[in-house]
Amino acid sequence: MCRDDSGAGNWQREIATLIDHIRQPGFPRLLAGVLGRLVHNDTMLLAVYREGERPVVLYSESDDDQSPAMQRYLSEAYMLDPLFNAVRREIRPGVQRLAEIAPDSFEQSEYYRSCYREFNLADEVILFIYPEPGVAFTVSIGRGPELGSVTRAERQALQGLFPIIEALVNQFWLVQSASYLPERRAGGALTQALDTFGSGVLTARERQIAGLVLRGFSTEAIAAELSISTGTVKVHRRNMHGRFNTSTQSELFALFLDHLGTLAPL
């Protein structure tokens, strides 16, 4: 998409169009169009995250909508994504770069290598909006290597427009949320996946550490997250691999995916 810099009058018309369509199902598509004219991008995904469920996609603009990586993300791998875990931590509303909210060893994680890297993104900026408790409305704007990183000016433009976008999304959700309620019944067991991974095999602390390792936390970051020493983390990691009879992140990741398959049918 190309950004339209032809003046404030155009932006007033853009916002007016969004307001006119705020009660209609096509609002997410129009919102994506407005944001796409504000920030150059290669991909854009508007999705809703609710506790206990898979993501609900409201709008997607990408050449890889049906790619194996996207399907894998939506069905299971999203639980290891920095965006999902930022939602779980109830990150404050606003505009965030994925690089700023990702764990320190995210690019060394098996999830990154086997799934996220397939999206071929050089940068990703995410808008976090909470239209109701327990519901996160997100807009993920991705840039490939050719476009490179989102510029400071573009991010400032997003931040400046964010209060308006947030208000519009909140009103859209008041009217249209019921359209997505059937999705609430699918995937309730998934929220238990990280908490129960290794149950009966690992100790409670080892289960915590396994979840953090899968999400891309380094030994040092895990120590800081759990307020324990790095030496203690190393002992727990060694014991965890010993109990699982694994030695690599890829083996741990494969066990986690197998664990998902044992959960209640969706």
Image: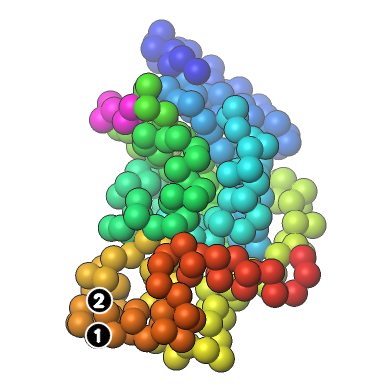
Amino acid type shown at disc 1: Thr
Choose between 123 and 165: the one closer to the eye.
Answer: 123
Choose between 129 and 254: the one closer to the eye.
Answer: 254
Residue 205 in picture, x, y percent from top left: 39, 86
Quarter of the image that includes the C terminus: bottom right
The residue under the point 41% across, 8% down is 6
Number of numbered markers = 2
Residue 145 in picture, x, y percent from top left: 37, 27
The residue under the point 31% across, 58% down is 105
The residue under the point 42% across, 29% down is 144
Residue under pointer 1: 232
The residue under the point 45% across, 35% down is 120
Choose between 103 and 3: the one closer to the eye.
Answer: 103
Please say if 256 is above or below 146. Answer: below
> Of the residues tagged 2 and 1, which is closer to the observer?
1
- Magenta region: 148-153
Query: From the viewer's perspective, is 255 left or right of 206?
Result: right
Q: Does any portion of residue 72 appear in the rendered image?
A: yes
Colouring style: rainbow
The numbered dot on residue 223 is 2
* SS assignment for the magenta stretch, majority: loop
Amino acid type shown at disc 2: Ala
Residue 180 in picture, x, y percent from top left: 74, 51
Number of other residues with Cα within 10 Å of mark 2, as a class: few under 14, some 14 to 19, many 20 or more:
some
- Residue 242 lies in the magenta stretch: no
- Asked if marks 2 and 1 touch (Cβ < 8 Å), the reply is yes
Provide the secondary structure element on which disc 2 rests: helix
Please say if 67 is above or below 9. Answer: below
